[in-house]
Image: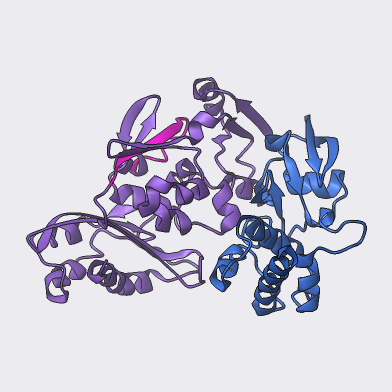
Amino acid sequence: MAKVPVQFTLNGAEKAEFVDSGATLLTLLRTKAADMSVKGGCHQGACGACSVLIDGELRLSCLTLAEAYDGARIETLAGLAERGVLTVLQTAFADHAATQCGFCTPGMIMAAKALLDQNPQPTRNDVVEAISGNICRCTGYEPIIRAVLSAARANAVGAA
Amino acid sequence: MALTVKTFAAVSDALPALQAVGARYLGGGTLLVRRVNEGDISISTLVRVSGPSLSRIAVSDGRAIIGASATMAAVARHPDLAFLRPAAHAIGGPAVRNMATVGGNIFAPAPYGDFAVALLALDAAAEIAGKPITLADLIEHRKQNGGRIVTAVSLALPKPGAFRFVKITRVKPNGLAVLTIAAVIEERDGVVSAIRIALGNMADRPIRARAAEAALVGRPLTREGIGPALAVAGDGAAPADDAVASAWYRREVLPVHLGRLLLAKG
């Protein structure tokens, strides 16, 4: 099988890997870049667990060809905390019991991050829309929505 | 299983690669890469055309030209395409909308293809090798159109308020469609003067509700006025049984949802 070179930045670090032609970004991140924070759920684009930011845009890594994003800036959950210090958003998830089994959490947090990066003061409906591509089987979604709104409020207080 | 990916800078360069057995043209990947993930070994080559020209959106002189690689998100946030926002926003979730393309939606099989329903009602034309083809023709023959690449769709901007769209789903805010209805309605002197209605998930491809259209011309948009049209709303439809709804259910609720769409104010 042909191998294809892919260069990208992952959470700020420059990476260069060879992947099988046609490999998904999900495969590249988990098997070559050893980033296990990105989860493989349905591999169909329905669950959102594989969500990452590519050049600042929320995308599904299970449906993305790794070689199509040569040169891209990729962000995953693993890159959010700095030296073990959780971000406001991650802390809010923990404080609001927005994560139980944790499997949807990476995708949920990247979706929430994508929202807050664009819209720092979202309405509840904005949050519901922002996570509408992410399935959670544990929490019933309310704790997640509360966590994102709480993080937005905390960010506003912090910036004030 | 070996999968080859071929990327070209120009559509004309990509065409020869697309003629090979097992070659498919890749848009956003939301349908095709999914099939690869699911083990569809009939796909052996993915052909891509890179470059910004296929994603361009131009709106001027009452017409919109939307590049086939323009994403649902790009359409939804375009300031001159606000009327199309409900249709673009109906697709998937935020991540899917950043990936799914206008061109890809035209070839999406039921239960997908809700944006194509909007394009059909808007009487859009698709551009293939620089030549226009009506969306109705393209959809009708889309299986035979494999091996050709749609580069853009163009459409006349509807008058303000003329375009209506609804996607009926069980899961909110978005899910697979029970059915989708798009309509462009013009009224004069209190009655319908011109109307196009497109239906999604009422057949294996988007279709026009021609019987309902004919029954609405010259009628007022009141409950009495639209009655005859609702009675024939499902003429020519062949809905499927699937995990979302049965064919029977789709036929039952189509006139209800069409009636609500026609009677909606503003």
Judging by colour alone, the chain drawn in blue in this rendered image is A
- Magenta-drawn segment: B140-157
The answer to whether B67 is drawn above or below residue A106 in the figure is: above
Quarter where residue A94 is shown: bottom right
Is any part of residue B117 visible from this angle?
no
Q: Nearer the viewer, residue B207 or B64?
A: B64
Q: Position of residue B147 (x, y in %)?
A: 47, 30
- The residue furthest right is A83
Q: Was residue B143 drawn as part of the magenta stretch in this picture?
A: yes
The answer to whether B139 is drawn above or below residue B131 in the figure is: below
Quarter where residue B246 is shown: bottom left
Q: Position of residue B140 (x, y in %)?
A: 33, 43
Q: Residue at x 13, y 62 (%)?
A: B215
Q: Position of residue A110 (x, y in %)?
A: 71, 58
State the scheme by which the image is colored. Answer: by chain
User: In what quadrant of the picture does the N terminus of chain B appear?
Assistant: top right
Q: Was residue B201 drawn as part of the magenta stretch in this picture?
A: no
Q: Colour of chain B?
A: purple
- The residue furthest front is A160
Quarter where residue B150 is shown: top left
User: In what quadrant of the picture does the C terminus of chain B appear?
Assistant: bottom left
Q: Residue at x 56, y 70 (%)?
A: A123
Q: Is B8 left or right of A53, judged from the image as shown? A: left
Q: Position of residue B114 (x, y in %)?
A: 42, 55
